[in-house]
Image: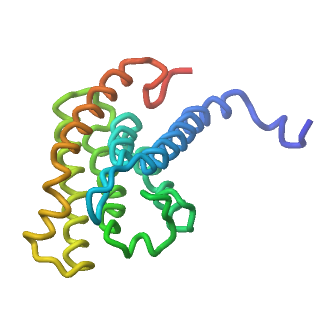
Amino acid sequence: MPIFAGSITPAIMNNNLPNLRMMVRAALFTVLIIIGAYVSLPIGEVPVVLSDFFVMLGALILGWPWGAVSAGMYLLLGAIGLPVFAGGTGGLQSFYGPTGGYLAGFGVASVIIGVVTNGRNSWRADAIGLVSGSIAVFALGIAWLMFKLNLSLQAALAAGLLPFIPFNIVKMMLAASVAHWVRTYPLMKKYPAD
């Protein structure tokens, strides 16, 4: 028996369980975001991926701050060189490539969606959060495309927004539906009663 085991009371253990649950859930969503990056449809400089779907879903289900922790872990793993981004890429150079703005947008979107929808099982809050988060992703992505590839606003919109609108609408609708369904289960509450 460890020396410190006697000082750990059941009350202390129970106070830490909600955080442990949320850490595990955030890690699981990080894995889903990574898997989503490998499901991609190349349609130009920026591929259609499912990683943004899992960023949205994680922020909706986990809320603030755990949805952002999940997206942040994904970005950190990619930044240190693990091949977790679309096309199996990784490293800091991925942030300087054409998709760098979208990657940064994932972090911003997870914060926005998590804050707007935190603790609510509301279609309206989900819609506001998802649209606001998607605007952040596309605004950063388009701005970076304009800078990185020296594109005009019109060319950046044509390359980095217009082809993605139908896919993004479907992903937002699916994320809101799945999150609304999942959040009704007692085990998926942010801090379930022990």
Q: Which of 5 and 180 is in front in this view?
A: 180
Classify residue 99 as left or right of residue 65.
left
169, above or below 98, in the image: above
Classify residue 14 as left or right of residue 91.
right
Image point (18%, 37%), residue name:
127
- On the image, which quarter does residue 178 sit in? top left
Residue farthest to the top, as pictured: 185
- Give the tally of numbered discs: 0
Image point (57%, 62%), residue name:
82
The x and y percentages for residue 73 are: 50, 55
The x and y percentages for residue 64 are: 37, 44
The x and y percentages for residue 174 are: 27, 31
Residue farthest to the bottom, as pictured: 150
Q: Nearer the viewer, residue 174 or 60?
A: 174
The x and y percentages for residue 139 are: 19, 63
- On the image, which quarter does residue 189 sit in? top left
- On the image, which quarter does residue 141 sit in? bottom left
16, above or below 94, in the image: above
20, above or below 147, in the image: above
Q: Which of 157 and 117 is in front in this view?
A: 157
Looking at the rendered image, the quarter that the N terminus falls into is: top right
Image point (71%, 27%), residue name:
10
| Colour setup of the view | rainbow
Looking at the rendered image, the quarter that the C terminus falls into is: top right
Residue farthest to the left, as pictured: 154
Residue farthest to the right, as pictured: 1
